[in-house]
Image: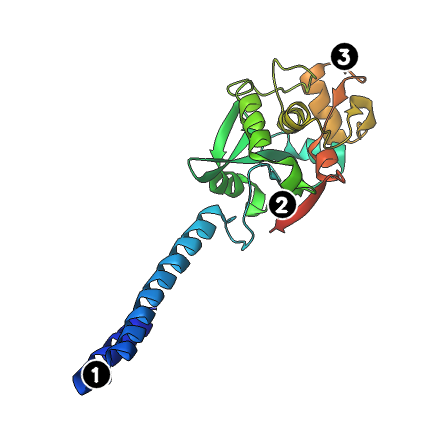
């Protein structure tokens, strides 16, 4: 755009020198201003999309998007084996101060910059999903409710025994409850502990470590896999 403006600036000067007329000079001056404004608009739009863009993807993320990756935690393999899914960790995206963050439950419930969250996953792989009718559901009022509800969970410890209470919270439970309480929707079907693959030796070992001989087979559980497979979500980006 700078080159475009400079060419017209030189052309206008030449026209003035040879007396070609004020109207034609005015035309080129107007073109210069338009070029400058266009360049500024393009710059601002580019800056906006770069700020919102998922690293390595042209797709932008929005508040309310759900992100999934394979955790490198000690329990990740057991979760994968129990649920039959590659994805063992998840969170919800919200914009804070114009930047995308992920609200997640790890050691505690906390905000993590999206770029850091993606990098922490195995291989930097990530899947971004969005509510099918996000435009209708995720109004600013609805997002404000999600933000308000999220404050109830900030700082709560991670739930290693996957209990269905709010005293401690695990990753998929956090996102499921935010959607349920803020929007009144259930993203993913609840299961019982007994519904998972408890015969796998990795899973059995982790269950003994957490519960001893008293496994709560009837405890309600929402898994990352159940939310990943929910028909209410569509995939908008993946790498």
From mark 1 to mark 2, how far is it between C-alphas?
A: 57 Å
Q: Which mark is residue 29?
A: none
Helix, strand or loop for disc 1: helix
The front one of 223 and 121 is: 223
Q: Residue furthest bottom?
A: 18
Q: Position of residue 184 (x, y in %)?
A: 70, 26
Category of crowding for the residue at label 2, using alpha-carbon neighbours closer than 10 angstroms: few (below 14), some (14–19), many (at least 20):
some
Q: Is residue 71 left or right of residue 98?
A: right
Q: Is residue 11 left or right of residue 169?
A: left
Q: Point out the image quarter for the N terminus.
A: bottom left
Callout 1: few (<14), some (14-19), or many (20+) C-alpha neighbours within 10 Å?
few
Q: CA distance from mark 3 to mark 2?
A: 35 Å
Residue density around tag 3, few if under 14, some if 14–19, many if 20 or more, within 10 Å: few
Identify the residue position indicated by label 2 in the image.
127
Report how many numbered discs are placed on residues in the image. Answer: 3
SS category of the residue bearing label 2? strand
**Residue marked by disc 1:** 14
Report the coloring of the rendering: rainbow
Under circle 3, the secondary element is: loop
């Amino acid at each position: 755009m700078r080159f475009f403006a400079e060419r017209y600036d030189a052309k206008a000067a030449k026209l003035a020198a040879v007396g070609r007329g004020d109207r034609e000079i005015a035309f080129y001056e107007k073109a210069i201003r338009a070029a400058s404004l266009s360049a500024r608009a393009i710059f601002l739009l580019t800056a906006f999309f770069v700020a919102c863009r998922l690293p390595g993807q042209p797709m932008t993320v929005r508040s309310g998007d759900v992100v999934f990756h394979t955790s490198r935690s000690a329990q990740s393999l057991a979760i994968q084996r129990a649920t039959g899914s590659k994805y063992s960790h998840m969170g919800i995206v919200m914009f804070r101060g114009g930047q995308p963050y992920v609200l997640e439950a790890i050691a505690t419930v906390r905000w993590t910059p999206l770029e850091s969250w993606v990098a922490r996953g195995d291989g930097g792989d990530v899947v971004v999903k969005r509510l099918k009718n996000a435009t209708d559901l995720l109004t600013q009022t609805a997002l404000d409710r999600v933000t308000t509800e999220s404050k109830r969970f900030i700082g709560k410890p991670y739930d290693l025994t996957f209990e269905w209470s709010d005293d401690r919270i695990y990753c998929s439970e956090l996102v499921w409850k935010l959607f349920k309480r803020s929007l009144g929707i259930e993203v993913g079907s609840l299961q019982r502990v007994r519904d998972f693959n408890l015969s796998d030796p990795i899973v059995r070992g982790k269950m003994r470590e957490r519960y001893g001989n008293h496994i709560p087979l009837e405890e309600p559980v929402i898994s990352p896999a159940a939310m990943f497979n929910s028909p209410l979500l569509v995939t908008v980006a993946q790498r």
